[in-house]
């Protein structure tokens, strides 16, 4: 049976690598994205993976979007909640909108997508949800109270929902990436990035595909006994 997966923010960066990895496993993948139509179009042309545009922070848009995907592609078996944004600044400089947007999209997106898909997975007796957290949700990070709180929330969300899915064949896990070479990290000023890399024991940034490999395992049949866990993929930067 061919499984259907949706990867939020799946058209570029870590999400693109995840989409491709799942496609390589024979899964029918669709990628969601927010607004970068040009990148999404190029992605679909390159990979043959359909791209669906909606804001994961918008509850109704997630419900409607997932109904559309189910109608057009098939019931959704796998959700990778990867879409995320940063709005960094010290607390003094951070606006309420910076706080709220990050909570709404990074954490709210996981809730919205789960509401849209988890009941169907439970009904069919099989499902995989993988939430992309962050090392900064585990350890905190200067200038990121919004992002660290949202990502930390994802780890709690994962453990709670895993308990609801455990007896129903639905696993819920998180991956906490360290610093990965994507547009998001390219936005970090070079001197700051140099200091960050100096603290990574393996001595380099991670590659998007290294996160995708972890997601692939958690989405596989082999991972049926893994639930409520957080896989840290961070070059040894934060161990616990
Ligand atoms: P990018 O900024 O490169 O890509 C983000 C993706 O998310 C894009 O596809 C974007 O769509 C999509 N997106 C953003 N907002 C929304 C929204 N409201 N609704 C739907 N899609 C949205 O990010 P990365 O690949 O670097 O990061 C992916 C995930 O990994 C994020 O959750 C991030 O927090 C997490 N992470 C990243 C780390 C890193 O070092 N890069 C480290 C730890 C965690 P569009 O193209 O339309 O803008």
Image (cartoon, rainbow, N blue to C red):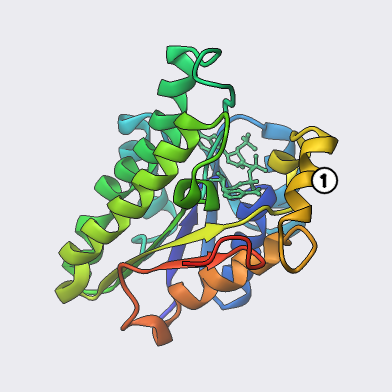
In the image, 210: left or right of 77? Answer: right
The quarter of the picture showing ligand 1: top right
- Residue 6, given in percent of the width and then of the height, sits at 47, 56
Q: Which residue is most to the bottom?
A: 222
In this view of the protein, which residue sits in the foreground, 99 or 169? 99
- Residue 5, given in percent of the width and then of the height, sits at 46, 62
In this view of the protein, which residue sits in the foreground, 101 or 62? 101
- Residue 133, given in percent of the width and then of the height, sits at 47, 52
Q: Report the residue at 36% width, 60% height from top.
A: 76
In the image, 74: left or right of 85? Answer: left
Q: Secondary structure at mark 1?
A: helix
In this view of the protein, which residue sits in the foreground, 181 or 55? 181
Tell me the quarter of the picture where residue 204 sits. bottom right
Q: Report the residue at 16% width, 63% height from top.
A: 164
* Residue 55 shows up from this direction: no
Tell me the quarter of the picture where residue 118 sits. bottom left
Relative height, residue 233 to residue 192 (above, below)? below
Q: Report the residue at 31% width, 83% height from top.
A: 225
Q: Which residue is mark 1?
A: 194
- Residue 222, given in percent of the width and then of the height, sits at 42, 87
């Amino acid at each position: 049976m061919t499984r259907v997966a949706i990867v939020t923010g799946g058209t570029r960066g870590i999400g693109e690598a995840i989409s491709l990895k799942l496609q390589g496993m024979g899964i029918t993948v669709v990628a969601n994205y927010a607004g970068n139509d040009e990148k999404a179009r190029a992605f679909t042309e390159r990979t043959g993976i359909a791209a669906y545009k909606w804001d994961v922070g918008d509850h109704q848009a997630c419900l409607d979007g997932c109904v559309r995907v189910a109608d057009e592609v098939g019931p959704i078996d796998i959700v990778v909640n990867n879409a995320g944004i940063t709005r960094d600044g010290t607390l003094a400089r951070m606006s309420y909108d910076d706080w709220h947007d990050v909570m709404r999209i990074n954490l709210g997106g996981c809730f919205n997508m789960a509401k849209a898909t988890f009941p169907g997975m439970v009904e069919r007796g099989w499902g995989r949800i993988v939430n992309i957290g962050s090392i900064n949700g585990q350890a905190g990070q200067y200038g990121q109270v919004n992002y660290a709180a949202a990502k930390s929330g994802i780890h709690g969300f994962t453990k709670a929902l895993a308990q609801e899915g455990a007896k129903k064949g639905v696993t819920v896990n998180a991956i906490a990436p360290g610093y990965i070479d994507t547009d998001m990290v390219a936005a970090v000023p070079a001197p700051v990035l140099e200091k960050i890399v100096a603290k990574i024991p393996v001595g380099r940034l991670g590659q998007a595909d290294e996160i995708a490999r972890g997601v692939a395992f958690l989405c596989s049949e082999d991972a049926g006994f893994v639930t409520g866990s957080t896989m840290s993929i961070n070059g040894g930067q934060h161990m616990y």
